[in-house]
């Protein structure tokens, strides 16, 4: 009797609720949240509780180790490593989130117009995607970075232009299947325009792809920004980022005698990327109806 009473409740669970339950049943995703959320809160709020600025110079604390005044030590010009670490995390996350948002817009529009625009449009856009995907990513990244220059906006532009082709293929594959469904065929028969089809039917049916892609791509964008900044092609000093903090600490003297100058930004980069990847994997499993998490 009790089983029969509860059966209708189980059947009425919507896809969103089932996805949330699968996500919070994923232990790796919960570990990722437990790591990432405190890092995010510290990065966003450090101005309120940490009294030292990222570019404030203390000439009495040149290359000093962790202490009560400088919890993570100071660098070669007396700047607080913790303040620069938190500011660098803020810059890295801003670059990653904005560049991923731009690449999502480009990738969705290219994939969507390719699927709904007809054979000529599809063929033309897919050849553009093929061209973008055949370019060597490292060389393409370095060439773009050298042309665009250094700074936050050029770095965002470079990363966003490198990231969209894969998403466009995923969106196109999803919408090619969607456009054959009865409700879309009926909408096209009633004279619905391509933008109406894209944003009324296409976008809601691609939300799962976009969310998972965005989460995983944020981690990749953080690594790309760190790599560019490490090479001197991303965020230029004195603005802090995890990449240029590692770049400033790459000399043998710093590596051997002042390990706190590279250890903390390196650990923050690894933990943040690892946590976001855990969250992204959890979201991917949560949106997969074939997922069977215990």
Image: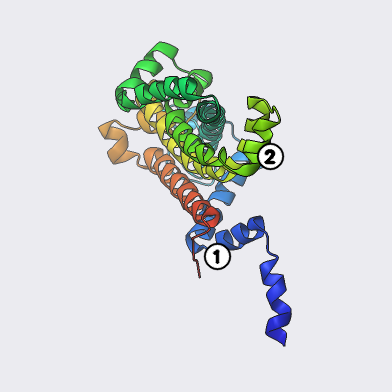
Q: Nearer the viewer, residue 21 or 261?
A: 21
> How many marks are shown on the rendered structure?
2
Task: Name the residue tied to disc 1.
Answer: 25
Q: Is residue 133 left or right of residue 180?
A: left
Looking at the image, residue 123 sits to the left or right of residue 71; the answer is: left
| Residue 28 x/y as whole percent | 47, 60
Please state which of residues 255 and 165 is positioned toward the viewer in this rendering: 165
Evaluate whether residue 75 shows in this view. Answer: no
Q: Residues within 10 Å of mark 1 (few under 14, many from 20)?
A: some
Q: Quadrant of residue 221?
A: top left
Q: Nearer the viewer, residue 66 or 276?
A: 276
Q: CA distance from mark 2 to mark 1?
A: 35 Å
Whether residue 172 is situated above or below residue 237 in the rendered picture: below
Secondary structure, mark 2, is helix
Furthest residue in direction bottom, as rendered:
1
Position above or below: 119 against 222: above
Within the image, what quadrant is residue 117 found in?
top right
Q: Is residue 25 above or below residue 75?
A: below
- Label 2 vs 1, first from the N-terminus: 1
User: Measured from the top left, where is residue 147 in percent x and y?
Assistant: 40, 11
The residue labelled by disc 2 is 48
């Amino acid at each position: 009797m009790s089983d029969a009473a509860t059966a209708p409740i189980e059947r009425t669970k919507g896809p969103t609720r089932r996805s949330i339950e699968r996500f919070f049943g994923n232990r790796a995703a919960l570990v990722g949240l437990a790591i990432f959320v405190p890092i995010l809160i510290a990065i966003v709020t450090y101005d309120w509780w940490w009294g030292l600025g990222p570019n404030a110079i203390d000439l009495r604390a040149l290359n000093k180790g962790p202490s009560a005044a400088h919890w993570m030590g100071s660098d070669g010009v007396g700047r607080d490593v913790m303040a620069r670490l938190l500011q660098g995390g803020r810059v890295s996350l801003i670059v990653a989130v904005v560049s991923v948002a731009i690449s999502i817009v480009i990738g969705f529009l290219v994939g969507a117009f390719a699927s709904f625009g007809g054979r000529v449009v599809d063929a033309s856009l897919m050849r553009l995607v093929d061209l973008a995907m055949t370019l060597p990513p490292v060389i393409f990244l370095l060439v773009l970075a050298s042309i665009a220059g250094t700074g936050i906006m050029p770095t965002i532009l470079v990363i966003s232009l490198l990231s969209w082709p894969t998403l466009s293929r995923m969106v196109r594959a999803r919408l090619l299947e969607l456009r054959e469904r009865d409700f879309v065929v009926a909408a096209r028969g009633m004279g619905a325009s391509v933008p109406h089809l894209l944003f009324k039917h296409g976008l809601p049916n691609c939300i799962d792809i976009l969310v998972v892609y965005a989460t995983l791509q944020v981690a990749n964008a953080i690594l790309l920004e760190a790599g560019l900044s490490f090479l001197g092609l991303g965020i230029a000093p004195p603005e802090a980022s995890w990449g240029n903090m590692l770049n400033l600490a790459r000399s043998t003297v710093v590596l051997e005698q002042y390990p706190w100058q590279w250890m903390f930004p390196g650990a923050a980069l690894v933990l943040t990327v690892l946590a976001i990847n855990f969250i992204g994997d959890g979201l991917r499993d949560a949106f997969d109806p074939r997922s069977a998490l215990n």
